[in-house]
Amino acid sequence: MILLFNSSSLFTAVASEPIPTLIASSQLEKEDFETASLSWVSPGDQRREELQGKWNLRFGGRNFSEAEDEATHIRMGLFVKGSYGLSSHMSLHADTGVSLVSGREQSRFAPAGEDSSQILVNQFYFNYEPADRLYLRIGALSQGHIGNSNLIDPKMSFPGLMQQVWWSGDAWVSKLTLQQVIPTSKSLDVDRQEKERLPTFYSETFSLLYKTKKWWEIEGSLTHFRFSNLPSVVAAKSGQLGNTINGEYNANSQFLFEFNGLSASGGLCLCGFEAIQYYLGYSYLENLEADRGFSKGETLSLAVGIAGGNVVFKPKFTLIYNESDSSPAYYNDSGRGHNNRQGTESALSLEFTKLNFKLLAKYTSVDTINDDPFQDSLATTYVGLETMHVDF
């Protein structure tokens, strides 16, 4: 078994007092550690009854190859994050975008979100603060706060409820997040034998971020998760993506194992230098319902941020390991081949701070852990340009 990484996504918090300036202000940003849901919202901004937000543009090309399957896409997107304060205790939030895609594809199973033009929804929700540091949310909720792409894609959103409570000190922030959501799927009559029960996904996450006085920043997250009543069409599609299932077609497919387990992730940042910073992170995933050899996932990653003049250079290298039944494959990271995968991912960004854009490149190469008739060696390449976020 390889040891691997995916650092924890900590806080999407609304504060009642100033939050310490931590990793989010350094050369290395949370998205460099695959923690896309990090966003600090200041008390003053949150309590103003006005629209505010930011947008950016992305343009890039992607190619993936798996045995006889191959696809090449060119994509351009506009992405917007915004909020509107209804009162001192209520607000609306949205994180969405439009992606225009053109390309060629010869594949059995298209990677989600890459094969067609569409409206993308990371999250939109209503937030209510009934008491100081307690937040209740309802809407389409981002799963990025869990911070483990072997379990669930951080860009995924599910409709449901979320409760958050957080605490902070001079150099630390901690948060407890509970959620009760409905995993998304679509099925026709031919995809099921009868009316199926409502699927659910429950999770409880405790996160901690701590900064020493000079050099180090430390983060960690622990999650308990449980999927229930996942529909047969999800089982059938997950069986093509690495999971072990029973059944020959959509309507009679079932997962061999239930999904009830633990996710832990953390990272250590040497962020005290202006010119160079280092981040080492690790994540662990285990499905307690699956047999040994089928139940675990790990990632291990090293990222470096190097600043020189008006350019920031950020290489990152990640080891990937995800056994066949650690999580429902339908909902985790398609770019890494879902489940039953091991391999590497190399990423590089070159950020031009004065010109307000950055160049990105990523190469992922994964193989199967166990032989599977639906899976083969997978290679994915992405090259793109992205503007910095512009406030409005």
Image (cartoon, grey):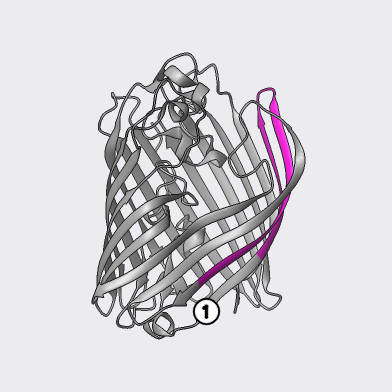
Q: Residue at x 68, y 43 (%)?
A: 116
269 sits to left or right of 133: right
Q: Is residue 47 left or right of residue 371?
A: left
Residue at the (55%, 44%) spot, across then down: 345
Q: Secondary structure at mark 1?
A: strand
**Residue drawn where x is 34% and y is 78% of the image:** 19
- Write down the region rendered in magenta: 57-82
The location of residue 203, given as percent across then percent down, is 29, 48
350, above or below 266, in the image: below
Residue under label 1, please give it: 51
Callout 1 crowding tier (Cα within 10 Å): few <14, some 14–19, many ≥20: some
Asked if one can make out residue 4 in the rendered structure from this viewpoint, the answer is: no
Judge whether residue 285 is colored magenta.
Answer: no
Mark 1 residue type? Leu
**Up/down of 108 relative to 214, above or below:** above
* Residue 74 located within the stretch drawn in magenta: yes
Judge left or right: residue 75 versus residue 125: right
